[in-house]
Image (spheres, rainbow, N blue to C red):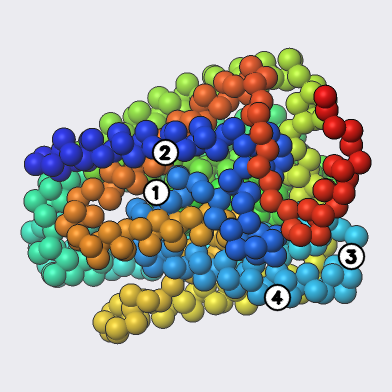
Amino acid sequence: LFDVCNGRQQVSILFKSFLGSFLWSMFQWFYTAGDSCGFGSFPTFGMEAYNRRFYFDFSATYVGVGMICPYIINFSLLIGSIISWGIMWPFIESKRGDWYDANLPNSSLHGLNGYQVFISIAMIMGDGLFNFFSILFRTSYDMYLKRTGRAKANAAGVPFAGAGLAGANERQALSFDDRRRTQIFLKDQIPTVVAVGAYVALAGISVLAIPHIFRQLKPKHVVWAYVVAPIFAFCNAYGTGLTDWSLSSSYGKLAIFIFGANIGAKDGGVIAGLAACGLMMGIVSTASDLIQDFKTGYLTLTSPRAMFVSQVIGTGIGCIISPTVFWIFYQAYDIGNDEGYPAPYAKIYRGIALLGTNGWDQLPKYCLRFCAAFFILAIAICALKEVANNKTWWIRDYIPSALGMAVPFFLGSFFTIDMCVGSLILYMWSKSDRLHAQMFAPAVASGLICGDGIWSLPSSLLSLGNVEPPMCLRVFDADTNYEVEQFLSTLPIPA
């Protein structure tokens, strides 16, 4: 949404940023002829740091996201990266052969990846559940005050004002545009009865239909999935709003373990776990997407009902197109065959399901203890932040987000470095000219994100046309470089 007075300048800067990001992505493509090639695999801080996923991958998208995300979120991501990839994972790797089988690859959930996945899920769940019950309590208390006639009038129309989520100073600080957006957003709310009724109706359809498709998954399991899914959906939507990164796949993996272990291998726990994973991911990811649409509607003065109807229409179309595309691929390629369509994630999720059906005891040593400790740590950080905000302690702006810390536990640190670079650019820009940065930084960030994202379309078309990049840019350490030079010296010189 552009400022009326400076709209032309903002659009101009947006397109310049977009063009620069697009051309930079195109330039990088020429050097990605093989695996680990290109600027995206450049060991910025050395080979050892690169092996620990500490490097700047020159992604315009994440730099732009870093300019949009609050400083504390990017700082939290950096802290999480240092704790996990700088301290914890090297320590756990030193226990290879003691805590888990030394012959296992790092991608196995029986090994290091088991710690990475489930510790990150534990932290996300701790942070998400704390905020879920906190907002539930505040909303309930606000409803109680309104029913008893003791709620203060909210002249500015700020949601949850009676619950203490927006103080008087915050209400006074709202601009006319923000007050107008809030008024329109609250005017066309979707009735709670409609939302709950639609969810219950869809749950009923799923309870009847899904067990007929996947007979290993019983109606009671589908019911439990729909009971638990709103909590997971809230946690994921909350996390996506903070970090712009949806972790619905992590909740899907958790569903595999829960339902797979409950049903057992003898009763088809592998198929049931995978079906529950798909069900959970569908609910959780859709919730975060819908919240993003609502935020877009809020910023553009669009009715939430219109955004919701658009989402419903798009989902309905997807229910037809997605199976059709799958059937085309299924008929055209040999799915699962490396020579045809390898589908590597299918093997990964099947392995997770096989592990899950054998129960939690199959996880590596001390994994559940680590999960419990980090779950409690996440709740403690959230509680400290809540107390600091209520007591107006000076440290309240410096307490990291537990959820932000959890994301790089699993994904790595490369995008964290990019986002911190984005924060650094915004900070230096704000120090130089705060008003200019406040006015034009969102346009620059949006251009960086869009340019990098749009390049994926021509890149995909080139790939479909079997057009490969002409060069590979790769960095070796000194020893490997010496071996490569020795090998090249044995080859005949081309005429």
Looking at the rendered structure, the kind of residue marked 2 is Ser
Q: Residue at x 66, y 54 (%)?
A: 254
Q: Is there a contact, CB below 8 Å, between mark 1 and mark 4?
A: no
Find out whether the residues at labels 2 and 1 contact each other: C-beta distance under 8 Å: yes
Q: Are marks 2 and 4 in contact (CB under 8 Å)?
A: no
* Numbered disc in front, either 2 or 1: 2
Q: CA distance from mark 1 to mark 4?
A: 37 Å
Q: Is residue 84 above or below residue 296?
A: below
Say whether disc 2 or disc 3 marks the residue closer to the N-terminus: 2
Q: Which residue is mark 1?
A: 64
Q: Which mark is residue 21?
A: 2
For the residue marked with disc 3, what is the amino acid?
Ala
Question: Residue 113, relative to residue 340: is it above or below?
Answer: below
Kind of element beneath mark 2 = helix
Mark 4 or mark 3, earlier in chain: 3
Q: For the residue labelled by badge 3, is the local secondary structure a helix, a strand or a loop?
A: loop
Kindly report which numbered mark, 1 or 4, lies closer to the viewer in this rendering.
1
